[in-house]
Image: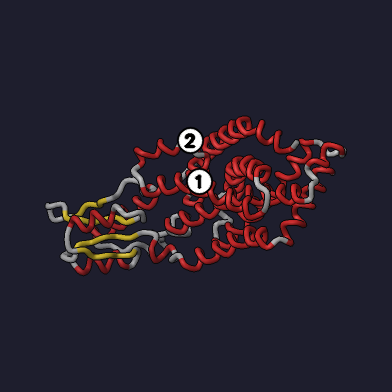
């Protein structure tokens, strides 16, 4: 009951503070913008790159089922294939036919779709009217899943900011020291302060999935992965709150944390996989891997639970390292 009262007090404080309201609402607004701005699956989920010298009837066939782009040289097609979306090149094989050029990291179902299209085209047959070649259970293009995953990771960081703001408010009211002479234990205080982060992570995560159209795609597993990632933010939130004198200082300190949190995401998306080991130390790397795999439906639950387990281990280790500082701040 004491823990719940602390949570309800934090909730009341956050609902009346402009900065807290901004933290609560901005991820949902951004999710709506991403949902509207990113193209639909039928327009961009699968793209085929053809040479300008390819027969017109070949291009006409693929245009019925995928986005077709024309290029002047094989090198241009290869460069297009190496970009981050699911684009496949069709190049002459020197024997009168064509072969599929793929980057190598595309989902197998999408690659199978292109192979099937190629088979139909070579046989001069049309797929049945009810056949779908650009969805395969995935309802959005890769760009959208990348942006939504990054937004969900941002939510876990902002959950730590809410905790920090709540602790700063307690410090300004001089109620932290008063805990020592009340029936509220330090454990109840920590749990009560953490509940606002849990509630925010779950509520914002659910709202983002709902607004962006991902709610039906492993939503429960995604929320669990979010909570695992938020464990790290909770620890950081306590440390920031206890070491900050006002709301502006707390917000500034959390903003500094956002930069190293985004680094693993940038490395994952922009760097060659052989360099990913450089950011294995970051819990946000594993959270990003789990959540994006769930959104794209390319990761099995075994891999997701492994990622969440690694995040939890890092969070516990970080908590044990920072525990002395947190205890000193609560005195």
Quadrant of residue 70 within the rendered picture:
bottom left
Q: Residue 81, how many percent across, how many down?
A: 28, 54
Quadrant of residue 18 within the rendered picture:
bottom right
Left or right of residue 96, residue 176 in this image: right
**Mark 1: few, some, or many residues within 10 Å (few <14, many ≥20)?**
some
Quadrant of residue 193 within the rendered picture:
top right
Task: Compare residues 137 and 68 and report the one nearer the observer.
Answer: 68
Residue 149's label in the rendered image is none
- Identify the residue at image location x=50%, y=46%: 261
Relative to 161, say whether 228 is above or below. Answer: above
Tell me the element at label 1: helix
Left or right of residue 270, residue 177 in this image: right
Tell me the element at label 2: loop
Alpha carbon distance from label 1 to label 2: 11 Å
Colour pattern: secondary structure
Residue where numbered disc 2 is placed:
281
Question: In which quadrant will I find the C terminus?
Answer: top right
- Identify the residue at image location x=83%, y=43%: 2
The reply to whether callout 1 and callout 2 are in contact (CB within 8 Å) is no
Q: Residue 135, how many percent across, how many down?
A: 43, 58
- Identify the residue at image location x=67%, y=46%: 241
Residue where numbered disc 1 is placed:
261
Task: Compare residues 273 and 320 and report the one nearer the observer.
Answer: 320
Q: Residue 274, how many percent across, how many down?
A: 34, 38
Left or right of residue 43, residue 102 in this image: left
Q: Residue 150, how many percent across, how many down?
A: 50, 53
């Amino acid at each position: 009951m004491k823990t719940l009262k602390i949570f309800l007090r934090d909730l009341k404080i956050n609902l009346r503070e402009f900065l807290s309201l901004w933290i609560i609402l901005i991820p949902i607004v951004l999710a709506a913008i991403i949902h509207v701005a990113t193209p639909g699956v039928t327009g961009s989920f699968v793209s085929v790159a053809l040479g300008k010298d390819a027969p017109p009837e070949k291009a006409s066939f693929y245009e019925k089922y995928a986005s077709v782009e024309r290029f002047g040289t094989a090198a241009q097609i290869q460069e297009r294939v190496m970009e981050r979306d699911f684009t496949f090149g069709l190049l002459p094989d020197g024997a009168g036919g064509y072969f599929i050029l793929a980057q190598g990291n595309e989902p197998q179902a999408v690659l199978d779709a292109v192979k099937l299209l190629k088979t139909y085209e070579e046989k001069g047959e049309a797929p049945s009217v009810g056949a779908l070649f650009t969805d395969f259970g995935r309802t959005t293009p890769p760009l959208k899943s990348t942006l939504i995953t990054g937004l969900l990771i941002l939510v876990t960081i902002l959950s730590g900011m809410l905790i920090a703001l709540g602790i700063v408010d307690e410090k300004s009211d001089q109620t932290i020291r008063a805990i020592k002479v009340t029936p509220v234990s330090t454990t109840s205080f920590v749990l009560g302060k953490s509940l606002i982060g849990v509630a925010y992570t779950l509520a914002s995560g659910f709202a983002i999935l709902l607004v962006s159209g991902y709610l039906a795609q492993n939503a429960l597993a995604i929320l669990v992965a979010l909570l695992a990632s938020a464990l790290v933010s909770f620890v950081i939130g306590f440390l920031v709150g206890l070491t900050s004198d006002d709301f502006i200082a707390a917000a500034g300190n959390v903003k500094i944390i956002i930069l190293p949190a985004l680094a693993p995401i940038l490395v994952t998306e922009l760097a060659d996989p052989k360099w990913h080991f450089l950011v294995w130390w970051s819990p946000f790397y594993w959270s990003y891997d789990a959540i994006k795999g769930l959104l794209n439906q390319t990761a099995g639950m075994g891999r997701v639970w492994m990622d969440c387990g690694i995040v939890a281990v890092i969070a516990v280790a970080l908590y044990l390292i920072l525990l002395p500082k947190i205890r000193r701040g609560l005195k």
